Image (cartoon, helix red, strand yellow):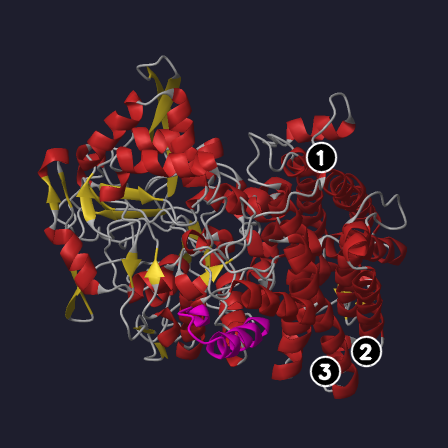
Amino acid sequence: MKKLILFSAIAALLFNACSDDDTPGDETYGNDYDFSAIIADYVDYTVVPTYADMKDKSALMLGATEDFLASGSQDDINLACEYWKQTRQPWECSEAFLFGPAANQSLDPLLDSWPLDQAQLDQVLASNQTIDAAYVKDALGAVLRGFHTIEYLLFRDGQARVATDVSDREKEYLVAVTEVLRDDCLNLWALWAGVEEGTAEAALAEELELELGTPYAEILKNAGNAGSIYLSQTDAVDEILLGISGIADEVANAKIADPVSSGDVLEVESWFSWNSLTDFQNNIKSIENSYLGGYDGGTSGACLSDYVKEKDAELDIKVKGLISDAINAIADIPYPFRNNLNNEEKVNAAMDAVNAVAAVFDDEVRPLFID
Amino acid sequence: MLKRKILIVMVIIGTWIAGCSINESEDILTPGGRVALPEELSAGESTVFNSTSKAFDTPASWVTGELSALFLEGDALYDNPRVSDGNPVNGGLGPVYAGYSCASCHNDAGRTKSTLFTDGGTGQYGFSSFLTFIRTPNGQNHKNYGRVLHDQAVYGSEPEGKVRATYTEEHYSFPDGETYSLITPHYEIYDWYADSIPVEQLEMSVRTPLRHVGMGLMLAVDKDEIKELASIQYPEYGISGEINWITERNTKQIGLSGHKAQHADLTVELGFLSDMGVTNDRYPHEVSEGQSQVTGEYGIQITTKEMAAVDFYMHALGVPARRAVQNETVQKGEDLFYQAKCHLCHTPTLHTQKEGVKLLDGTNLPWLGGQTIHPYSDYLLHDMGPELGDDYSQFNASGDEWRTTPLWGIGLQEVVNGHSHFLHDGRARNFTEAIMWHGGEGDVSRQLFSKMTQEERETLIMFLRSL
C-alpha cells in the first residue's frame, strides 16, 4: 500500500507538476461509499452483544458474591472468581470500542479504574461505616470501585482466596462494590442499546434513575444524517478503525511495555488475579470482532473486512493473519505475565506482533477508508 | 514515516522537473494520501486528521520515536487516577481534591460532562468536574479554605463543601418566530466542612474545564500579533480586546490560558497540587495545609520528570483538521460568521513565533514554531456583559471580562465528550444558546445572529461544527 501511495503521489506530480489544479475532487473530508450496513451490523452484532454479555455475567457475579456473604464457603468464592473472569472477558473484548458512553459518561474509569486505592479501602474496611452499594457509589470516589477492587477482595496470587481469610467487612464491601459494577454494566449496555419497556432491565434502570437519552447505537447508525453528532459515515467508521489501532497501541506500548521496561510487577494491571495474558488476548479479540464482525461466535453480518477485501483482497488476508499472529504471540508468553517480564524473546515477539496490527490498521487499512 | 518518504520523493521530482515553482515540501498529506487543503489545516504541522472521540487526544504528526514514548508516558499520567498516599504507585491524592486525574475533568483531553448538568451535582459521589473558585470580597482566602473549593476527599477527611446547581429557564423568540430558551444557573455551596461562609462574604466563580485543544500552539503564538490585536478597536461595534497582563514566577507576562487568560503556562504544577492535592517541586505544600485535617508533611508526590511528561503531552496534542471545508453550506456559514462580526474577537488566523516554545523544563519544541494556525480566538479579554459576569476579577480581567474562547475543535466536543454545553460554566446547552448569551462586546454579533433567518442561523452553526 505504501508503494501504491508513493506511486500515486509521483504520478500526480508528473501529470500536474506545473498546474495549480492538484487539489482533489472530493467535496468533503470523507468517503462516499455507503457504510450503513457495516456500521449497523458492527453495532448490532459486536458492540451490543458484548455489553449485553457483560451485563448478564455481572449479575451472575453479584449473585455469587451474595451467596458467598451468606455461606462463607470456598465453593462460593471460587464461583465468584469464575464469574469475575467471565465478566472481565466481555469488558476486555470491548476495549477496541472505548468511545461513546464508556468514555463520555466516564464509565471506563468507574468500571476499570487503575490503580486500586488499596490504602483507602483498608481504612474503610477498618471503620464502623455501614457499607452498601449507595455508600460505595455516592460517598467514595472512582478508585474504590470497579473490577480491580473486586479482584483485590476475591483473589490472591492468581487464585481464589482462602474463604476463611475473608473478613465479614470484606464480604460486605465485596457485595456492595459488585452491585455497583453490575449497575454500571447495565448502564453501559443500556446507553448503547436502550431498554425495552416492561423488561427487568427497564425496571432496574428506572430504580437507578439512569439518564439514557438517545441510544448510542442509533447515534452511530445515523452518522452523516441530520441530527447525528457525526458529520459523516466516514467519521463513524474511523471511530471503529482508530478504536482498533488505539487498543493495539495500548496493549503493545503500555500494558506490556511499561512493566517490561521498568521491571516493576506493580505496573502489571491485574495484581491479584494474574489475569493479564487473558486480558491482552481478549483485547486483540476485540479487534478481531470489530474487523470481522460478531461476538463470541455469534452472527457477524457486514463488516470492515468485506470492504477491505473488495478494495484489496491481499491486504484483507494480511490483516486477518496479523490479528491471529498477535493473539498467538501473547498466548506464547509463559503464565503468569508478572513472572516473565524478563522473557525478552517472548515478550518482544508479542509486542512486535501487536504493534504490527496497529501499524497495518493505521498505515494500510485506514487510508482505504479515509480520504 | 510514510509522509516523509513521500515528501522526499516530491521534493526530488519537484527539483527534477525544471521551471516549476511548486513548493511541495510544505505539503501535508491526509491519511488517504492526498495533499490537505489549506482550509483543513487548523494548526499547520500539528493538524491531525481525526474527527472521532479521540480527536483531541491524538499526538501531532511530529511526535515520533522517543517523543512518542514521552507522549505515552504523559498521557498515562494525565489519564490514570491518583490514589491516596500509602499505595505503591500513583499516590498523593488529597486529602481534599477536586479531580482524581487530569482526565477526570478533561476526559479525552476535552470537557467531561458534569453531573451539575444532569442532577444538579448530587449523583455519582457529587463529582462535578468543575472548579469552584472561592475567596473573600477582599480577594483573600477564607480561613480554613484555599482558592478552590475541594468537593472531594479521601476516606478519613471531609470534602470542604459541595456545590449544587439549580437552573431557571426563560423562553425567547427570534424575530422570525423560532423559539429558544436560556437557563440561568444558581450555585450554592452546602455541607461546608468548617464554618459556613455566608453568601455576602463569598466571592465565587464556577467554571467548566477547558478543552485541551491547541494548548502548545497557544503558548507559541506570536506575542506581537496579540499586542497588535489588542491595539485595534472597533468602536462601531463596541469591541476592544485587552491583554490580561499577569505576573507569574515574578515575571510580567501575557496571560493566555484559563477562562480569564489568567495563566501563562499550562498549569501542570498548579493542577496537580490545587486540583488533585498532589504536591510537587513548585508547590511542595498541601493545598489544604493549615486545615485541621492535614496532619503532616506529605513530601513530594509527583516527580519533576513526570510533570514534564504531562507538560509535553499537552503541548504535543494535535489539533483536529477542519471538516467539510468544500461543502457549500459550510462555506456559506463561514460567510455568515463574518457577517455577524464573530471574527472580530474569534480571530480566524494567527501565527506562532519562529522559535517554537519552551516546556516547563526548558526543552524547546521547534515544531510548534513558524506555523499558521486557526484558533478562532484573539486570546484577549472582552467584556461580555453582566449576564455572564461572575464578579470574580483576576489580574486585569474584571468580573464581566472573559478570554475569547478558541473555537478550534468545538465542532467535535459532542463526539468527544457526549455533550454540547458551552461557555465558562456550561450554561449554554448548544451553539444557539451560547451565541445568545453573548452580551457586552458580543452584543452586536448576538443581534446580527438574531436577525438572520432560521436557515441562516443553522448554516452558521454548520460552519461552527466544521471547526
Q: Which residue is mark 2?
A: A333
Look at the magenta stretch and give its main secondary structure: helix
Between the C-alphas of marks 2 and 3, the distance is: 9 Å
Element carrying mark 2: loop
Q: Position of residue B452 (x, y in %)?
A: 32, 23
Q: Are marks 1 and 3 on the same chain?
A: yes
Residue at 32% across, 17% down: B174
Q: Magenta segment range?
A: B1-25
Element carrying mark 1: helix
Q: Position of residue B131 (x, y in %)?
A: 35, 48
User: Is disc 2 in contact with disc 1, using a CB cutoff of under 8 Å?
Assistant: no
Tell me which amino acid carries mark 1. Answer: Ala
Q: Chain of mark 3?
A: A
Between the C-alphas of marks 1 and 3, the distance is: 40 Å
Residue at 31% across, 60% down: B218
Q: Which residue is mark 1?
A: A193
Looking at the rendered structure, which numbered label has been put on residue B198?
A: none
- For residue B145: magenta? no
Tell me which amino acid carries mark 3. Answer: Leu
Q: Earlier in the sequence, mark 1 or mark 3?
A: 1
